[in-house]
């Protein structure tokens, strides 16, 4: 009887741990704010964005002109900067498997753009998408920027300096590799032939921002661990999300 009880308790604990390990909400921790930004929470409240704030699925971030917000998405894709005069919704931050880094990250840009640095490789089963009304950019282990324009917003420029972005529009998916840039057509499907080379200024800007937000994350990790942090290891899986 005691052996059966121990077996039952072990099975229950294993089930609980497995469930926790395979179904967690992701989080976006605010590393730094320059200027002014607000967040509209999924529940309807609004607040100023401040460093240390933790955001989650359903939250919408809006930056003023000349303002930026740097985020640590942790397992969901490392570091992201919300560019000036932008508005985006964290449509889905989900962690299916922590150990294998299998996640779903979906960000819907309503206005403006983002620059990202996915330092740690995501699993092949992961989905990391930057969405707009006019197309979807699928991100891998990548340094990139995605800019939008128009109403409703559509993706107008993608720059990749490391890794690959898969862009889908009008039922066609194309590849944008390291050292390439792409300006999608205003209408119709994506066209691989339109993939070109970024300007020197675009390349410098993406690489500089990618390095800056990674360093900011590394500094935050070092401070939290008493000086022994490692860049890319901040935002531990404490899954509480501020409301």
Image: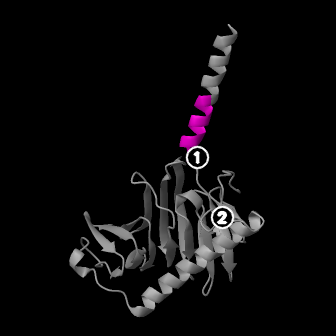
Position in image of residue 4 (x %, y %)? 64, 12
Q: Nearer the viewer, residue 182 or 210?
A: 210
Earlier in the chain: of badge 2 and badge 1, it is 1
Q: Residue at x 50, y 67 (%)?
A: 118
Q: According to the image, what is the colour scheme of the structure?
A: one colour
Left or right of 171 in this view: 8: right
What's drawn in magenta, residue-wise?
Answer: 14-24
In which quadrant of the rendered image does the C terminus lie? Answer: bottom right
Query: Does 181 lie within the magenta span?
Result: no
Disc 2, SS:
strand
Point out residue 108 in the picture as x, y percentages from the top left corner: 48, 66
SS at circle 1: strand
Asked whether residue 58 appears in the rendered view, the answer is: no
Is residue 137 visible in the rendered image? The answer is yes
Q: CA distance from mark 2 to mark 1?
A: 16 Å
Q: Which residue is mark 2?
A: 29
**Magenta includes 21?**
yes
Q: In this view of the protein, which residue sits in the foreground, 233 or 139? A: 233
Instruction: Name the residue that disc number 1 marks.
Output: 24
Location of residue 90 by image quarter: bottom right
Image point 45% across, 61% down: which residue? Answer: 128
The residue positioned farthest toward the front in the image shown: 228
Quarter-wise, where is residue 43 in the image?
bottom right
């Amino acid at each position: 009887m005691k052996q059966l009880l121990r077996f039952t308790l072990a099975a229950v604990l294993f089930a609980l741990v497995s469930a926790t390990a395979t179904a967690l909400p992701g989080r976006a921790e605010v590393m730094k704010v320059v200027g002014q930004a607000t967040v509209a929470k999924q529940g309807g409240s609004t607040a100023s964005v401040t460093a240390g704030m933790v955001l989650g699925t359903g939250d919408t971030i809006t930056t003023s002109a000349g303002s930026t917000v740097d985020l640590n998405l942790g397992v969901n894709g490392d570091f992201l900067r919300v560019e000036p005069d932008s508005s985006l919704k964290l449509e889905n931050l989900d962690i299916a498997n922590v150990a294998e880094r299998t996640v779903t990250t979906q960000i819907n840009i309503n206005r403006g753009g983002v620059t990202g640095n996915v330092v740690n490789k995501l699993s092949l089963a992961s989905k990391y998408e930057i969405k707009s009304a006019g197309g979807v950019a699928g991100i891998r282990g990548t340094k990139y920027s995605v800019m939008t324009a128009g109403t409703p917003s559509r993706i107008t420029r993608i720059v990749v300096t490391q890794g690959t972005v898969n862009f889908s529009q009008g039922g066609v998916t194309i590849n944008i590799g390291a050292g390439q840039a792409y300006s999608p057509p205003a209408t119709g499907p994506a066209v691989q032939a339109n993939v070109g080379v970024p300007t020197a200024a675009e390349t410098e800007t993406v690489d500089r921002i990618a390095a800056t937000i990674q360093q900011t994350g590394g500094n935050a990790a070092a401070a939290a661990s008493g000086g022994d942090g490692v860049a890319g290891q901040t935002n531990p899986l404490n899954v509480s999300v501020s409301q």
